Structure formats: structure tokens, C-alpha cells
Image (cartoon, helix red, strand yellow):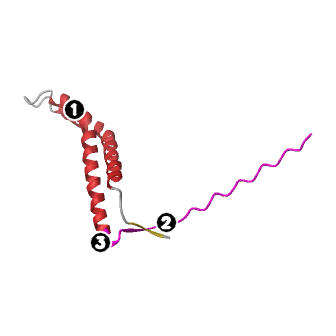
Amino acid sequence: MKHRIRRIGVLKAALIGGIAYALMALLLVPFFVFVVFAGAFLDAGMGPGPVGAEWMMGPAFMLLAPLIYGVLGFIGTGIAAAVYNLIAMMVGGLEVELEPLAPAAAAPAAPASPAL
């Protein structure tokens, strides 16, 4: 059975996108911070430079990255949903074919134990 996605709720799509991007940032930020700290240790013997900047940027990045990714994900997903709605008005939207699930078969009843 075919269905058509004619419109996407822009605010709901943006909210889901923003949360998804913020969660991805929470998962990826520790790896980025590790690379920054590793680079600071490798660069320690290379001469004068912005000593200590890596130590301040790590925590700031860890706090701000999920927020920034979430806001940008919210905005980007909202724009994408709005653009989809405009295009769907012109061409009719995406067609999706769905298959109904068969109802679960009832489990056989346990035999009653004989009365004594």
C-alpha cells in the first residue's frame, strides 16, 4: 500500500534534528579534545607558542560544541524541512510503500491441571 509524505512539520523536524546533532556532538567531542591534548604534548618541545591555550580550549569546546551543533542542527533541519514542503507542493512529495504487520498469533493456553 502506497502512501505519500506531503508535508513535514518544520518545528518538530527541527527539534529532532537539533537534539540529534547535539547528541552526536556529545559523543564526538571527547575524541576531538583528545586530539587537541595529544597535539599539545607533541608540540611541547617545538619552541615558544601559545602555551596553555589547548588547556583552556578543551573544556570550552566540550561545553560549547554540543550547544552550537544543536542550534545549527535545529536551524539546518528546519530549513531542510521547509524546502521539502515547498518542493513537495510542486511535485507531490515522496511516495513510501508500507506493509502492514501480521497480528501476533495468540499463544496456546496452558492445559489446566487436574483437580485432586
Q: Which residues are magenta?
A: 89-116
Q: Residues within 10 Å of mark 1 (few under 14, many from 20)?
A: few
Residue placed at 29% from the left, 71% from the top?
90
**How far across and down, in percent of the image, does residue 62 sit?**
26, 34
**How far across and down, in percent of the image, does residue 106 sit?**
69, 55
**How far across and down, in percent of the image, does residue 47 sit?**
8, 29
Of the residues shown, which amino acid type is indicated by label 2?
Leu
Q: CA distance from mark 1 to mark 3?
A: 45 Å
Does residue 20 appear left or right of residue 111 in this picture? left
Q: Give the label, 2 or 1, closer to the camera.
A: 2
* Residue found at the far left of this picture: 48
From the viewer's perspective, is residue 17 above or below residue 60?
below
Label tally? 3
Residue placed at 19% from the left, 28% from the top?
55
Residue placed at 30% from the left, 58% from the top?
81
From the viewer's perspective, is residue 106 above or below residue 72?
below
Q: CA distance from mark 2 to mark 1?
A: 46 Å
Q: Which of the two residues, 4 or 22, is positioned nearer the viewer here?
A: 4
Of the residues shown, which amino acid type is indicated by label 3?
Met
CB under 8 Å between discs 3 and 2: no
**How far across and down, in percent of the image, does residue 115 sit?**
90, 42
**Which of marks 2 and 3 precedes in the sequence?**
3
Of the residues shown, which amino acid type is indicated by label 1?
Ala
**Which of marks 3 and 1 precedes in the sequence?**
1
Disc 1 target residue:
60
Based on the picture, tell me whether residue 101 belongs to the magenta stretch.
Answer: yes
Residue placed at 26% from the left, 53% from the top?
76
* Residue 64 in which image quadrant: top left
> In the drawing, what numbered circle is on residue 98?
2
> In the drawing, what numbered circle is on residue 90?
3
- Label 2 SS: loop
